[in-house]
Every structure is written in structure tokens, then in C-alpha cells.
Amino acid sequence: AYSPRFGRFLLMAAAFLWLLGFALPFVAIPERGGVSGFALASASAVNLWMVPILAFAVLSILVRRRTPATMRSARLAVAILAAGVGASLGFTLYRVFNTTHLLVERVGHTIEVVPQVGVFVIAIGVAVGLVGALRFGVLRDAPPTYRVE
């Protein structure tokens, strides 16, 4: 059940990258410093909670799917979960930058928000998860053996 074969390793790596990116600094605001995904989700971007929820959903699928046929049947679901993490990340970044733009208009003070390492780790995890969804349930063929005579 816990073998990294059949494309499980990529999906496991993607889920751990999502969780790691959620814990790392997500955006940097000059007045507050670096804000982690957890702090941002707790304060204003509630939709960012989808990242760890979907990571645990992918890990649950990895534990429960044991045969290659059942793994292949879950490919679409895993791809949708990975796309959901990407959509949550994109929507959160849109909201953060749009809110800062509105604050700049209202206050007249420039506020600079810079994406930090957590955003990029989650984005890499989304790419790994989408590739892993394509490989889920497929055993790589053994390399051909050659006999020298």
C-alpha cells in the first residue's frame, strides 16, 4: 500500500510540497514581514485552506488505492484535486494583490506585496501533481536486457 511504484511517488511528493508551501512564508508585506500560508488563511484568505485539505485528500487516495486498475480509475480525480490547489493559489494571489491595489487607492500610501517561497513551492507541487496524475497506476516498463554472445 505504501510502495512508491505505479506513480505514487510523484503524487506523494506533490502533496508534501503543498503542505510545505502552506507552512513557508507566502507573501511579504513590508510592515508585517513574511506571512505564512497558515497565517494568511487564518486572517483573510479562507480559500487557502483548500491547499492542505486537498493535500490530505490526495494522500488518502494514495493509501486507499492499491491495485493499478483502481489507481488508474482515480487519475481524473487526482488531476482535479491538483488543479483545485492551483486554482486556490491563483485566487488567493489575485485577492491579495487586488486588495492591496484597493488600499493604495484608498489610503494613497504605496504598499508592496511580494510573493515568497511558499507560493513557488505550491506551484511546483501543482505541476508535479498534474504529471503524477498522468502516471498514477502505470508501472514503468523494465529496460530491455541484452545478451552478449
Image: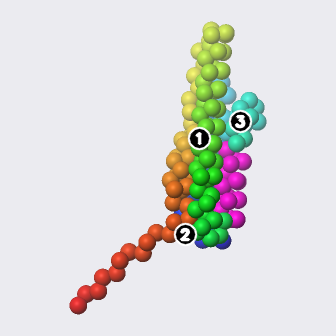
Image-quadrant location for residue 41: top right
- Residue at x 55%, y 61% (from the top left corner): 136
Label disc, if present, on residue 47 of the rendered structure: 3
- Residue at x 61%, y 47% (from the top left corner): 80
Name which residue type carries label 2. Arg
Q: Which span of residues is magenta-colored?
A: 51-64
First reached walking from the N terminus: tag 1 or tag 3: 3
Q: Residue 12's x, y, as percent?
A: 60, 59
Label 1 and label 2: CA atoms lie apart by 25 Å
- Residue at x 66%, y 65% (from the top left corner): 65
Q: Main secondary structure of the magenta part?
A: helix
Q: Residue 31's x, y, as percent?
A: 65, 24
Name which residue type carries label 3. Asn
- Residue at x 59%, y 41% (from the top left corner): 86
Between 140 and 75, the residue placed more toward the observer is 75
Q: Secondary structure at mark 1?
A: helix
Give the quarter of the figure containing the N terminus: bottom right
The reply to whether the C-beta atoms of the residues labelled 1 and 3 are less than 8 Å apart is no
Q: Is residue 60 above or below residue 52?
A: below
Q: Decide if residue 141 is on the left or right side of residue 82.
A: left
Residue 66 in sight from this viewpoint: yes
Label disc, if present, on residue 55 of the rendered structure: none
Label disc, if present, on residue 86 of the rendered structure: 1
Mark 2 surroundings: few (<14), some (14-19) or many (≥20) residues within 10 A? some
